[in-house]
Image (cartoon, coloured by chain):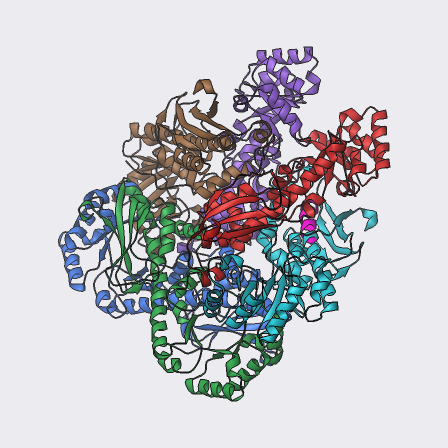
Chain colours: A blue, B green, C cyan, D red, E brown, F purple
Amino acid sequence: MRKNPLDIPLRDLIRFVEEDSPFGDITTSAIIPDSDCSAKIITRQDCVVAGLAEVIRLAIHYRISCFSCVSDGQVLAAGDTVLSWSGSAHAILLLERTALNLLGRMSGIATAARKTVEEVRTINPSCRVAVTRKTAPGLRVADKKAAIIGGAEPHRFSLSDAILIKDNHLALVSLPIAVECAVSFSPYRVVEVEVEDAESACIAAEQGAGIILLDNMDPAALQHTLDLLSARGLRDRVKVEISGGINPDSLSAYARLSIDIISLGFLTHSVSQVDMSLTILSPRDQ
Amino acid sequence: MRKNPLDIPLRDLIRFVEEDSPFGDITTSAIIPDSDCSAKIITRQDCVVAGLAEVIRLAIHYRISCFSCVSDGQVLAAGDTVLSWSGSAHAILLLERTALNLLGRMSGIATAARKTVEEVRTINPSCRVAVTRKTAPGLRVADKKAAIIGGAEPHRFSLSDAILIKDNHLALVSLPIAVECAVSFSPYRVVEVEVEDAESACIAAEQGAGIILLDNMDPAALQHTLDLLSARGLRDRVKVEISGGINPDSLSAYARLSIDIISLGFLTHSVSQVDMSLTILSPRDQ
Amino acid sequence: MRKNPLDIPLRDLIRFVEEDSPFGDITTSAIIPDSDCSAKIITRQDCVVAGLAEVIRLAIHYRISCFSCVSDGQVLAAGDTVLSWSGSAHAILLLERTALNLLGRMSGIATAARKTVEEVRTINPSCRVAVTRKTAPGLRVADKKAAIIGGAEPHRFSLSDAILIKDNHLALVSLPIAVECAVSFSPYRVVEVEVEDAESACIAAEQGAGIILLDNMDPAALQHTLDLLSARGLRDRVKVEISGGINPDSLSAYARLSIDIISLGFLTHSVSQVDMSLTILSPRDQ
Amino acid sequence: MRKNPLDIPLRDLIRFVEEDSPFGDITTSAIIPDSDCSAKIITRQDCVVAGLAEVIRLAIHYRISCFSCVSDGQVLAAGDTVLSWSGSAHAILLLERTALNLLGRMSGIATAARKTVEEVRTINPSCRVAVTRKTAPGLRVADKKAAIIGGAEPHRFSLSDAILIKDNHLALVSLPIAVECAVSFSPYRVVEVEVEDAESACIAAEQGAGIILLDNMDPAALQHTLDLLSARGLRDRVKVEISGGINPDSLSAYARLSIDIISLGFLTHSVSQVDMSLTILSPRDQ
Amino acid sequence: MRKNPLDIPLRDLIRFVEEDSPFGDITTSAIIPDSDCSAKIITRQDCVVAGLAEVIRLAIHYRISCFSCVSDGQVLAAGDTVLSWSGSAHAILLLERTALNLLGRMSGIATAARKTVEEVRTINPSCRVAVTRKTAPGLRVADKKAAIIGGAEPHRFSLSDAILIKDNHLALVSLPIAVECAVSFSPYRVVEVEVEDAESACIAAEQGAGIILLDNMDPAALQHTLDLLSARGLRDRVKVEISGGINPDSLSAYARLSIDIISLGFLTHSVSQVDMSLTILSPRDQ
Amino acid sequence: MRKNPLDIPLRDLIRFVEEDSPFGDITTSAIIPDSDCSAKIITRQDCVVAGLAEVIRLAIHYRISCFSCVSDGQVLAAGDTVLSWSGSAHAILLLERTALNLLGRMSGIATAARKTVEEVRTINPSCRVAVTRKTAPGLRVADKKAAIIGGAEPHRFSLSDAILIKDNHLALVSLPIAVECAVSFSPYRVVEVEVEDAESACIAAEQGAGIILLDNMDPAALQHTLDLLSARGLRDRVKVEISGGINPDSLSAYARLSIDIISLGFLTHSVSQVDMSLTILSPRDQ
């Protein structure tokens, strides 16, 4: 099983708590003398859990003991316990919303990713599902990690790690020159080229691109492009990725094509948080 | 017209760019000699635009000139130009994704907020729509600002600004004591109490709470509670807020009640980014 | 008893040490081989101690063991031990001045606050003493926390948590409009209005302000204003706060009025540090 | 004239504003549409102004134009204008309290320093007045700069810049060894030794200390020590600094001694802010 | 011409100045009243200049005007002017050492890189010279940028951008499994494998590695490996990189081999700063 | 034995790791399931080890257990073990390069410093070897600490701790005035003056400078200056430091002079990292 390559730095996790309490938690301060208690976080929806490693590191920093039977990537049913906490009531209430927001968002991404990956693999077992850089600002690591936990391919983390030539580059430089420059740029970087028609796809493949991204093409146009690449003996030289206009409804029509990767923005740009809640256990519940 | 009380610090905006380019933009470096160019950001969906002030401040920091005919809060139609940029091609391509992600998320929240506010006001002109603290981690300011731009009430910014007694507090302290402590805590803070039944609502109101949050109650139970508050002469002493289980489909049934505020988590916890795109203008387009 | 809602982040506490030693402690490095020792911090003045929680967290971070019989808010006599430390001599000497400066300032504020609160309560048991935002730059959390420990009301923490309309606002907008806008701004925020005459106080109260701040008025003018508010049936609708020109000498004359809150800048803007000292215990002292 | 060697980094100045407005200025947002206006900062007390350079840099960062006829170190009378601002009303109101707190504290230190320096110099023209490291946590640069502006000697900025052997060091190592190690530590660092009796002063001077700090000695004991140093031919080898128990009342008795430096904690540890205020100018005032 | 993909953030450049002046520049403060002056930075050695873009951005931030006839990557002779400054004498003296240290280090790396690249290309025009991650801690961006300016290939910027399987990985997992996992990990990442013998090289190539890093092999062993790869038809499938034990003296022996890349640690781990100096121009020099 | 006065803040050490892994270690993630293992760091060259304290603090932060028989400043032979680690394989591989870069650079400086100090002391036992501020940007603390560990004098840490009047100051102010201002600036700061001829040296000494820095003079000119200082009775009043044009080859000719300090830029500006490596121990090695 693939490991998660990413960890949100503790400093950022603390910052999330601080943005929720620049001058402390006045409600709790006003009404509750601090004492130790227990609490549990439960999911109210079926989900693939993600963010657990982060929430545990954060809670430990605030001297809350953590206990959990599950781990990131596991499938949970509505009502399942995600994590149990034991420690200062003030600390638990301080972290409650931050923990739920983090778990909720990351699990939301992981759950959608898992669902999509499974749907695609049922139709086309060798096809990968990739996420894009359309993440929430400041949450690149969290969003990419959640997608990986859900089984998706993280694609580029940032502008620094792989080359992807897009339409806006091609407004400034011609396709053949762009690909040639990119291929000669560095042997340590993959070169991907986004094109919108079959002929350009062939040019990019001939120039040495490693991945062709066919953007905003319908299944028929995609099939035509794949055929042309094959006819010219270029199909085996490249991976083929598709993107643009693919949503949950149209996904299966695209997955049937003999492509390598489907990349999808909605997995991170339109996230529904998984609904989770924290409950302080009163003595008789413990 | 109400002004927006919030600005994302420039330092955070720069951080968003840096997370997208820890070692620069290798694609652009590889294939394009830097030169000046123009670009425009267009929305592909009808929307209420938000995040424009932030994107302009960020672009100016990178020495990109900005021109726009619209401002935050304005309604745009698909195809409308949001913002025009003029400056270094390298700088424009470096900021492209960060700008679109920020505009997309904030406009997504503003658009959903506006739609909901209008729907509620049509039914109940004096009823407010509030957002909760279920925001993306690290994006509290951005998400609250976007909601305000959309016409929603921002509710608490954080645990530090108003008192809200919730079920987890009441697991540790009784309702009457909690409200009494909260009311005596500070004259500078509003006291709100979350309850789930009519009798508790009356106790909270009698103890001096300023706002009663009726959580997870169906319209019938809510009506019963409002009636009981009125019968006991408590209705005018408090604002009544409702939350829990309210979604776009059920919204109108709730909005009909004579309540003051509907607070909704989905406006920030389940955001769909507005689809916007940036286009580099080639000479003949300019 | 009311809890303290605030903690200075550890990161800031460490920064205080680093500003005192950008390149280490050259004296100690030059003359003392490191070894374990004990030390105690003693107060040289009667005081209400504050800052202890911060100093303990900081010392633990530098692996110094802490032992104390007292806690924040306790009254100490000159000569009493505040805190005992045990650990590396180098670490203890590195932290000495930072710890004393923090304890000294926070205890200075807490002591002055306690004295004032007690003086006011002897005369007027239901009157609160509030501090303002006239704190040392960068020390808002520390100064407010110390005031709370001393028994004072913290008032607004910042410009973000409650509405206070002041003379500079009224130079730009009329009083009735200002109050009306403020009251309709948000049900989650208290609205306070600063006025300097009785008639304005009545207007603010009529418009729905929750707190009237009578600024720079002498006791006679204040009494007149209170009388007018009562005569118009407005006194019970609002809390009345006074400020301006109140110093330790004139305090009792003001406290006799039937007001709700006296807010005082001098508690934080003119602080005398409590004199405390740290003593390394030589073997025979231990 | 000696220049000020210190500047508070802009980043820290911005942090001061942010601690006063984590979620913006809700009052101003609620009631005032933004527009340009003018404002002036006036001192309500006679003072030596300090902090002006910082407030100007900060205001410029928020696009407020600054105009001032005075500069740091100048003596002002109550009622004098310190600084005029012109710009966005929202920006001016956002910065008002931070600017006044910074000017007030720094001017408070500068004013007290100037007064003390003048008093000492009248009696003993060659005697310097130094401040200690008893500054507000996080404000070392601001407090030292203000003292310099007031004419005081800043003494050590931190533990990293000069050697000062104190009682707590001498609890761990003998005086002769401590001084010997310190003198041989580095030719680039001055060595100062704190002693509490005449004999120790002579030992320190003999071992090569450059400055002897006579701590907590009354004028008679100090005179005896000075005599003994002279008798043994050591007085010319060292500078003599005194500290401890010196307050405004006893200052003149100490200043009469033929010493080189008087160091005083109260100049920074017990600061009274100078009372300054900002006034928005309505059209007819401008 | 390849552009430089990297910029050191301004925040880090400012930090370099602040580490050189936590409490200002006391020498200049003590002896020089501030006034405007000019200065020029001259190289005392032949060099390829690098760091100029950074020093200019930094100087502008301190309001120093910059003028230069050269740009990063240009070859300079001893005595040539690198950059002219005009502005506050205090600012120029504050930045002098930081600017020289940054220019000196980056030019040192660029100069060594250029020399090595030219030596290799003379012998083997298609062979690249790459630098490793053996950079100074905290200076990854600066060191890589300088190497790029000198004409070298930057190789991996960090552990996050390409896959490189090394001996320490192979202590924990077998070579075939490691390569198989790596190749299937992501189509967006190049897979490189470090081996120390010909047989392992063939296994890695067969499993699909894109680059084979032959480490610590002498020219004869390298030739044998290249021959074996060719004999098995694997040579064209992979790039071949060599490293280990290659120094300026032995470089030419290695460059003769038909390899693709030579990677060299000494270009960044053993840097000699180029000797540059700043001279304040007195009036008659200007 | 002199202690090291400096510690690199943990926050900076973590930053070094983060610059090497903005999105994690993708190689290790791709191919190795995490498990505990051991590793040892070995030096491949004779050296004086430095940086060990830093690497141990960093490793502990990542929950790696450390064991070492050596400590900073100890002489090691090629092949000696520097440090043993035990913990998560993922954590060990994440830190490998950062640890080696830090140990390598700091040990490189310490080793060169020790060698130079010993060479000088053999010739002139009372002569110190000092390093300059020609350090790598951002690494002032690390470079100075390494030099101290190697036995060198750290000289000024920054512009804030001692006064050094150089040629660029003297372009703006005359020598006698500069020295007079500097001497009167503060009794807590040493005053050093850089001159390039014998007459200036005498002027500086007469004006009260504590250290004369004779820059860029050959041994004959230096001897002449020393003779002139003696002839005028000034030699005993000052320490004499020399710098400029001194390299390993010419060192002994300079060391023979009766000077107090030789300061050398090359010890920090032209560092060769000590070659160290980390080896994961497979079960049979442990």
Q: Is residue A275 magenta?
A: no
Helix, strand or loop: magenta stretch: helix
Q: Position of residue B121 (x, y in %)?
A: 36, 75
Residue A237 position in % (x across, y down) = 22, 51
Image point (65%, 62%), residue name: C148
What is the quadrant of residue D194 in the picture?
top right
> Which residue: 29% across, 61% down?
B275
In the rendered picture of this protein, how many numbered marks are placed on residues? 0
Residue toward you, F286 or F189: F189
Given residues C266 and F276, the one toward you in this image is: C266
Q: Quadrant of the N terminus of chain C?
A: bottom right
Q: Quadrant of residue F187?
A: top right
Residue E131 in view of the camera:
no
Left/right placement of residue A211 relative to residue C25 reads left
Residue interval drawn in magenta? C90-103
Who's the residue at 73% across and 57% down the image?
A: C249
Residue A250 placement (x, y as % from top left): 23, 68
Q: Quadrant of residue E218?
A: top left
When the figure is inspected, residue E60 is found, relative to residue F259, above or below; the finding is below
Horizontal side of C25 relative to A104 (left or right) equals: right
Does the rendering let one see residue C286? yes
Q: Position of residue C191 (x, y in %)?
A: 53, 67
User: Is residue D175 depicted above or below B159 in this figure?
Assistant: above
**Relative side of B112 to A103, left or right:** left
Q: Foreground: C52 or D180?
A: C52
Task: Judge whether residue C100 is colored magenta.
Answer: yes
